[in-house]
Image (cartoon, grey):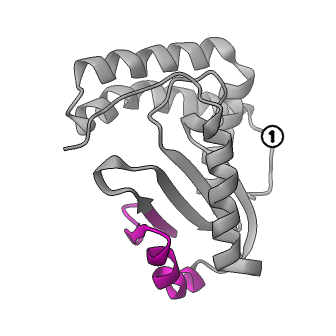
Amino acid sequence: MRKVEVFSDHENWKLMFIEEARKLKSIFGNEILHIHHIGSTSVPELKAKPIIDILPVVRDIHIVDSFTDEMKYIGYESKGENGISGRRYFQKGGDNRTHHVHIYQFGSYEIKRHLAFRDYLLVHPEVKDSYGQLKEKLAEKFPYDVESYISGKEPLVKEIEVKALEWYKEDEYI
C-alpha cells in the first residue's frame, strides 16, 4: 500500500532529475527534442511527494512505443496513455515510486499546461506556499488514500492552472 507523504524541498531532487534525464536521452537519442523537470519536485521550497516528474518532448509520439523494452530495462512500467490522449506514461518504483515520465509530441497542449503550472509557482511564492500547505494537510488527513489526497488538491490545482495558463506567454509547446 502506498503511503502519501510530502517533504520539504530536497537538493537531491534536481540531481535525480538530471541523472534520469541522462538515462532517457541515452535510450531515445535524437527522438527527444527537449526534456523538462515538472511537478512539485521541480519547484524549490515546494512541499512534494518524493517522485520526480519528467516531461520529454519527442518528434513523433508513436515511436515511443518501440522503446518500451528499453524503459523496462531501466525499471519503468509502461502505462500507455494512462487517461491522457497523446501521452506515453511510465512509472518507476512500483508502490514506492521514484519517477514518472510523461512523454508528449512536440506541439501538444499538455506540454504548455505542465510548464505554465510549474513556472507560475516558481514566480508566485504565496501561491506555492498555499499549495504546499494544502498538500501537507491532505497527506496528514489521507496517509493511505492517494485518491482522496489527489481529489482534495484538485480544486486548487485547477484554479492555479487557469491563472497559470492566462499568465504564461510561451507560444511554442516545447
**Magenta stretch?**
62-90
Q: Looking at the rendering, which quadrant does residue 43 occupy?
A: top right
**Residue 78 falls inside the magenta stretch:** yes
Reading the image, the residue beneath label 1 is 169
Residue type at numbered disc 1: Lys
Q: Secondary structure at mark 1?
A: loop
The residue under the point 65% across, 63% down is: 56
**What residue is drawn where x is 52% and y is 88%?**
66
Which is more toward the observer, 137 or 12?
12
Q: Is residue 90 left or right of residue 44?
A: left
Residue depicted at x 73% and y 31%: 167
115 horizontally vs 8: left or right: right
Is the N terminus in the top left, top right, bottom left or bottom right quadrant? top left
Q: Is residue 55 magenta?
A: no
Residue 165 seen anywhere in this rendered image of the structure: no
x, y percent for residue 41: 58, 36
Q: Height in image: 49 above or below 95?
A: above
- Quadrant that contains the C terminus: bottom right
Horizontal relation, residue 79 to residue 167: left or right: left
Image height check: is 15 above or below 109? Answer: above
